[in-house]
Amino acid sequence: MTGPPIVPPPSPEPSRAGAETAAPSEVRKFLLERGSSALSDRAFRWVMLISALSIFAIVALIAWELVARSQLTISKFGLQFFFKSAWDPVSGDFGALPFIYGTLASSLVALVIAVPLAIGLAIFLTEMCPKFLRGPLAFLTELLAAIPSVVYGLWAVFVLVPLLREHVNPLLMKTLGWTGFFAGPNYGIGILAAGVILAIMILPIISSLTREVMTAVPHMQREAVLALGATRWEMIRMGVLRNARIGIVGSIILGLGRALGETMAVTMVIGNRPEIVKSLLGLGYSMASVIANEFSEASDDLYLSALIEIGLALFIVTIIVNAIARLLVWAVTRGAPPRVA
Amino acid sequence: MALQQNPSKATQIRRMLANHAATGLAVLSTILVVAPLVAIFAYLVYKGASSLNLAFFTQVPKPVGESGGGMANAIVGSGILLALGSLLGVPVGIAAGIYLAEFGRGSRLANFVRFTADVLNGVPSIVMGISVYALIVLPQKHFSALSGGVALGIMMIPTITRTTEEMLLMVPNAIREAALGLGVPNWRSVLAITLKTASPGVITGCMLAFARVAGETAPLLFTAFGNQFRSMNINQPIAALPLQIYVYALSPYDEWHRLAWAGALVLIVLIVVSVSLVRYVTTRGVLKGAN
């Protein structure tokens, strides 16, 4: 985790790749063609190729299964499915709006809490932290990422929810109740609880990627700003954050992608009621948790198809969100020396 | 800013204050991040350790109302599921990584495969669960350990592929050419020379993937399904540690809550040990030998 050395970057990517493929390839080509093992080599190559293609096949198969199995609701409700708030398995009337609302609301709460903390942590770790603390702290946040979702849920049910119910929520209702976002019965569980636990879960992702893009900012930038007489904060703001902002946005979006698809912890604390309430203390339902809760009891085909269509929507949304995030992060870290964790 | 001849006193104070405020906020957010982590771990160890005993590892769950019992079946079940997952995920993941690094360098197909691996990595685990349900459980008409293993295996592939590729790219070309120059067939040179040189890194990738799926619950809900009894049959529903924790956490019984905490502690210890091993391997320069 030491920063990149202060030598002029040796323009790593293109030239290295070029040197590897250009010069030695003739030797290698000659050696490969001269070999007497053409048959086994070709077989080996095919096996490897098939394995690589199987990744594509799996993704395609997932997409196809999801589309095929949700045909019933797609043809019956069309796009209307995503704008209706009815969820009545008995009379066969389905709409995904409450779940979309619950997913978005809890993810946004998570982002509002996690983003400032994650960026603050990244700034501390890359720019301010004494060296002996950096390793342990980075390791601790990595551990935060390794804790399984269900364990977060367990902790949330027995520690976070009582804490919210007894201390935090009454305070919020008293001070911010007039906004309407913190009104109503105080269950402890609900959208706010889901948002808080999601925030803890996505923090390490956002912060480690932010750290990565901040490390990728050349040291010369920092030194130049400092040499102009800037304070440390001004150096961070002008020299580092401004250069890394695209990558930071990318890491936030990646965190959002994780939050949208998170299942177990959210299911355990969001309240599981398909309603749209303005208050964050109210009970909600998310797309992932409705699948987790109701999939195994979905008795008729239409019900099952509705749940699978929600899964399909989740699949598409996370692909788009992840693709955008990867592009943004890649745009910043491309060409930078690889980070050795 | 630098051209200003006489920065006023007020500006200077303002800049100093902003600097200190920023430092303070960064330290504060670090504390706020570390606090829940410490809280989770402390509470987990406290609750888990007080309910862990030998019975937890040797007995199957007791019916409601009876005290005692353990999660032996879930531990064995998780082991079987993870073994099945690794059986699928490790070979396919490594082979795909070999393709990307050794054969497909720079080709459009390789970029495409790399992108789909990233897509697969981002698929929410619950969606993976219903897809495998539709693919395997529905045609078979019953839940099975096999389908759970397949779901976990698929989730392992992208991580393993990407680490394998990165590690293989670090192996110097001279080594490959030396092997070829000695008349070694290409397939043997890849397997016995290149892959072997990169093996610490590849193993790291496998363990990371393993640690990631070890705690997965959502993909097992509709595939492995869970089981209250000891079962080793991969064609039958099987218990898994994360599933059992989920069910017990939401139950109204104190005895089951106790078992859930113990299970969570066991799971966390398993994961932390493998992540720490990975970190040890990556920081101790074992990998740098390949560079």
Image (cartoon, coloured by chain):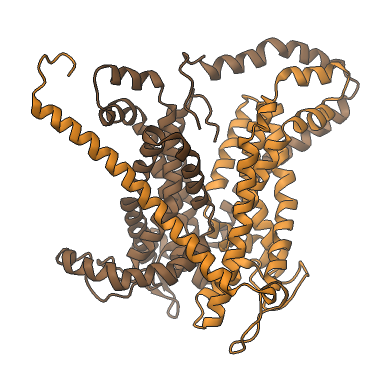
Give residue A37's quadrant in the image: top right
Residue nearest the observer in this picture, B250 or A6: A6
Q: Is residue B20 above or below residue A67?
A: above
Residue nearest the observer in this picture, A167 or A82: A167
Q: Let me know if residue B220 appears in the view.
A: no
Give residue A182's quadrant in the image: bottom left
Q: Is residue A6 above or below residue A165?
A: above
Quadrant the C terminus of chain A occupies: top right
Colour assigned to chain B in the rendering is orange
Q: Is residue A35 left or right of residue A319?
A: right
Colour assigned to chain A in the rendering is brown
Give residue A30's quadrant in the image: top right
Please report the residue visible at 34 percent of the width from the left and 33 percent of the height from the top. A245
Residue nearest the observer in this picture, A245 or A155: A155
Q: Report the residue that reaches farthest toward the bottom.
A: B65
Q: Let me know if residue A329 appears in the view.
A: yes
Please report the residue visible at 81 percent of the width from the left and 17 percent of the height from the top. B178
- x%, y% of residue A209? 45, 39
- x%, y% of residue A146? 54, 52
Q: Is residue A185 above or below residue B64?
A: above
Please report the residue visible at 26 percent of the width from the left and 76 percent of the height from the top. A185
Please report the residue visible at 58 percent of the width from the left and 59 percent of the height from the top. B268
- x%, y% of residue B55? 69, 77
Tally the numbered discs.
0
Q: Is residue B209 left or right of residue A321?
A: right
Q: Is residue B210 left or right of residue B87?
A: left
